[in-house]
Amino acid sequence: MSNSSSITQFLLLAFADTRELQLLHFWLFLGIYLAALLGNGLIIANIACDHHLHTPMYFFLLNLSLLDLGSISTTVPKSMANSLWHSKAISYAGCVAQVFLYVFLISAEYSLLTIMSYDRYVAICKPLHYGTLLGSRACVHMAAAAWGAGFLTALLHTANTFSLPLCQGNALHQFFCEIPQILKLSCSHSYLREAGLIVVSVLVFFGCFVFIVVSYVQIFRAVLRIPSEQGRHKSLSMCLPHLAVVSLFLSTGTFADLKPPSISPSLDLVVSFLYSVVPPAVNPLIYSWRNQQLKEAAWKMITGCFPEAMNS
């Protein structure tokens, strides 16, 4: 038995015990991580460098890519390093940092996805007021509010979680430091403070979800009133990538929260992989799949960087 003051490190759950499977895990995560870096990095560079993409929709997309890069960089590299060096340990300070950064980035991303649904609502339902309601200053303020909300949420949750006395050992049944796993190590009823904070967060989460649903109900009603099929198709194509990203974010997170507590550790790792690693790697594909402007900006950047190779 130990308390939190004597814990210097936590032990994370490994994906595999044999050396061969550990190396397989390392190479798999490396491939996914590099794909996420490349996809999100291209979106960030394209939007930053191409003035045609300096619009509210792409400004929010740039922020989303930054958050995706941050969230996958918070969990995956440490897991890769542990597999490569045959280790399970993460320092106490490293665990605190991982909890804070992950909650910060995920909370900010959900806030940003809510704002992006408002952007799509104004673009389709109130196009004449788009420039007024979503001017550059308003966009910066909304993005700053999303990042600020994430920071405040992470600060409160991290402070509450690591102020609890921990006396159930230091082994976490997860491949990264996660608040529910740390709460299982607590031996004090003061964890109810964190439980109360989680309830408040769930209520805010549900409020954002209702806002997104109402926005899309209004969007689909407006789309159905468009007389031309081409107009309806164009309007839907503006919304479907965002709707797909929101669905992926909510479905993986909800599945993780509602999974049975008796689930096996190996299946628990797969579930955590789905909600913490898959969305940041897949989001760039979703947004760039049928986005001609992003494709043209990417091609322009590639031809500008390697003109001789393209000409040959």
Image (cartoon, rainbow, N blue to C red):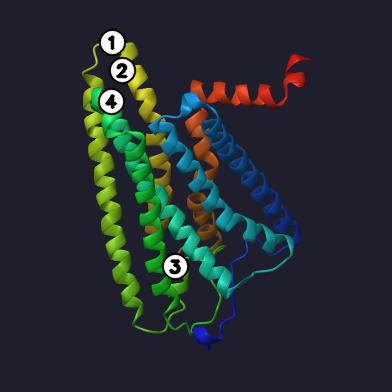
Asked if labels 1 and 2 touch by Cβ distance under 8 angstroms, the answer is: yes
Classify 162 as above or below 143: below
Q: Amino acid at mark 1?
A: Ser
Q: How far apart are the two marked residues, 3 and 1, measured between alpha carbons?
A: 50 Å
Report x, y in % for residue 33.
62, 47
Asked if labels 2 and 3 touch by Cβ distance under 8 angstroms, the answer is: no
**Picture disc at residue 124:** 4
Q: Secondary structure at mark 2?
A: helix
Residue 290 seen in the figure: no
**Picture disc at residue 232:** 2
Q: How far apart are the two marked residues, 3 and 4, measured between alpha carbons?
A: 39 Å
Q: Amino acid at mark 4?
A: Ile
- Specify whether 283 is left or right of 123: right
The residue under label 1 is 228
| Neighbourhood count class around disc 2 (C-alpha, 10 Å): few under 14, some 14–19, many 20 upward | some
Q: Amino acid at mark 3?
A: Ile
